[in-house]
Amino acid sequence: MRGVGSVSAASGRRGRFGRRIRKTAAVALTAALTAGAAACSNPDSGGSGGGGSAVVGISTEPESLSPLLGFGKDGNSKIFDGLLAMGTDMRLKPALATALPKVGADGLTYTYTLREGVTFSDGKPFTAEDVVFTYRTILDPKTNNASKSELDAIKDVRAEGDDTVVFTLKYPYAPFAHRTVHPIVPRHALQGQDVNTGPFTTRPVGTGPYILSAWSKGEKLSFKANPSYWGGAPEVKKFTMAVIKDDDVRATRLRAGDLDGAILPPNLAAGFKNDKSKKTHTATTYDYRTVTLPTGGDVTGDLAVRRALDVAVDRQTMVDKILEGAGKPAYGPVPTDSEWFAQGTERAHDLDRARQILDDGGWRAGGDGVRTKDGVRAEFTLWYPAGDKLRQDHALAYASDAKKAGISVKTQSGPWEVIEPRMKQDAVLAGGGAPGDPDFDQYLLLTSTVAGDGFNNMGWYDNPAVDQALVKGRQSGDKAERKAAYETVQRELVKNPGYTFLTHIDHLYVVNDSWDGPSTQVEGHEHGLASGPWWNVEDWTPKK
C-alpha cells in the first residue's frame, strides 16, 4: 500500500478513491491545468485522437521501474514479462515459459521450459540465464527489495541450457507458481550497474509489449508499442499514463477530453452515467482500507483501545455512504466472500460493547467526553494522503465513530514524504490486499519480522501466535493445514486487532468506448500500471 503489508513502497500501493467533489469547479480546473500542463502541451498525451493512442489517468506512480526493486512483481508491468501471467479469470497462463511448470512429487522442484525466439527491446536474446540472474539478484541481501521475503521459499535457481530453468525450494510453498509472474530483467543490461540506483531503475529494458519512451516524474509515463513483441505488436501504438493524484482533477480532465480513461470514486464515476461515449468498468478486489494502530503508542498500543475501536466502527455505513455500495465491510485482509475467510470473525457495530471494553480496560470518561487512563488521554493522530478523498472520508467517519466511544482521533492529511517518518507513532489510513493466496496479503502485513520495514507491517504488529501461523501457512503443502493456519491468524486479529479494517472496495474506471478489448480482472491494492481495464491494452483494437 502506500498502505500496509503486501502494499509496498516500490509498487506504490495506495487507495485512490474518494467521493466528495470540491465545492468550486474553479479550484479543480486550476489544479487540473497545473497538474497536467506538461501532458496537455504534448500532442502525444491528449485524449483520444485516434485508435492508435490512449491516455489514462492514474493517481500514483512507481518509485522505480526495476523489477529487481519490486516493480511489477504481481504482473501486468507493460514493459516486462514473467515466466507466467494471469489471465482475465486470474488463472495462470504461460508467458516467457511455454507451459505451466512441471512440479516434482515432493513439491520442491519447479521446472520451466522457456519460449524460443524472444528478444528484449534492445534486440538481445532472452535466455535462462536472465531468469537466474533476476531471482538471484532479488534475493541478494544487498538488493533493496522490500518484498524479497515473498520469494523466501527459493533455495536455488539454475539454468539447464538456454531454454530450461529449475527452481529448488526449501519447503513446499503451495502458491510458488504464482510468484513466477515476476518480471524478468536482462542480465546484460545490468552488468556493471548498481542495481539499487543505476540507470536501469528509470530506463528499463524488457521483453514486454511496450517500451518506456519517456518518464516525467510526477506527471506522466509514456510508452510506445514494442514492434518485436513475441505476442505480436500492439495496435495501440502510444500509451500514456498521466499521474494525477487528486480524484476531482482526474474527473475534470476526463470530462474535458484530456484523458481516455481514469480510475474514479463512485460519485465521480456516476457523473458520466449518461455519457454515451464512455463506459464504466467495475473490478471486484481484495483492496481494503484499514487504520494502522502502532503497537508502541501509549493509546494505539493499548489492547482495550484496539478492541474497542474494532467494534465502535460502523463498517456497513461506510460501505453505504462512502462507497455508495461499491464494496463490502472488511474484518481483516481476507474478503468475506473468499474461501479463505474465517466464518464467525465478523464484528458487529456495537458502541455499548466498545464503551464496556474501555471501562474494563481502565479508560475513564472525562469531562470533555475523552477518556483517560493513568493521566493519558485517549487521543491519537490519524494521517491520510492529501488528495485521496476515499481515505479522507474513511478517516473522518472513523474519527466520528471513535469519538462516540470516548476516543479522540485527530485527522491530518499530507504527502507520503511527511507521513512515512511518523508511521511508528501515528496511525495511518492505509490500504492493501492481494488476490489469490492468503500468504500474499497477510505475511508482509502482519509478521513481526518485517515490522517497520518500509511500508511492510506499518502498525508494527507483534503477535507470536500470528507469526507462527503465518510460517505454517506458507510452509505447508496441505490445503487443510494452511486453511487452519490462516483461520488462526484471523481469529487472533479479533483478540488483538493491530489494525482496524474498514472496507473492501470495488474499483471503478470510466473509459472512452472507442476500443474492443477492455476488461477487468480481480484486483489487488496496486493500481495504475498493473490494474484497470488497461491491464491488457496490448490486446485492444479500435472499434470499427
Image (cartoon, rainbow, N blue to C red):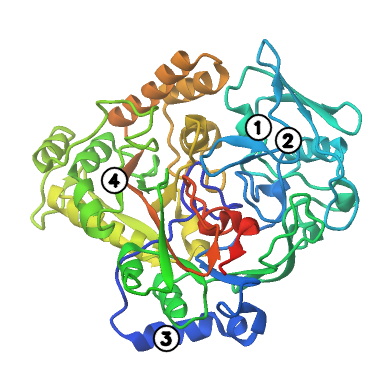
- The amino acid type found where label 2 is placed reads Leu
Residue named by callout 4: 328
Mark 3 or 4, nearer chain start: 3
Asked whether disc 1 touches disc 2, contact meaning CB atoms under 8 Å apart, the reply is: yes
Give the image location of residue 442, x and y in percent.
Answer: 47, 34
Q: Residue 126 or 404: which is nearer the viewer?
A: 126
CA gap, disc 1 and disc 2? 8 Å
Residue 148 falls in which quadrant of the image? top right
Mark 1 or 2, nearer chain start: 2
In the rendered image, the vertical position of residue 125 relative to residue 472, given as above or below: below
Q: Residue at x 16, y 41 (%)?
A: 349
Marking on residue 151: 1
CA gap, disc 3 and disc 4? 32 Å
Tell me the element at label 4: strand
Q: Between tags 4 and 1, which lies in front?
A: 4
Residue named by callout 3: 29
Q: Residue at x 23, y 43 (%)?
A: 309
- The amino acid type found where label 1 is placed reads Leu
- Looking at the image, the residue that sits furthest to the front is 544
Asked whether disc 2 touches disc 4, contact meaning CB atoms under 8 Å apart, the reply is: no
Q: Between tags 2 and 4, which lies in front?
A: 4
CA gap, disc 3 and disc 1? 45 Å
In the rendered image, the vertical position of residue 190 relative to residue 447, given as above or below: below
In the picture, measured across the screen, residue 306 lies left or right of residue 277, that is left
Mark 3 or 1, nearer chain start: 3
In the rendered image, the vertical position of residue 190 relative to residue 413, given as above or below: above
* Mark 4 crowd level (few <14, some 14–19, many ≥20, 10 Å Cα): many
CA gap, disc 2 and disc 3? 46 Å
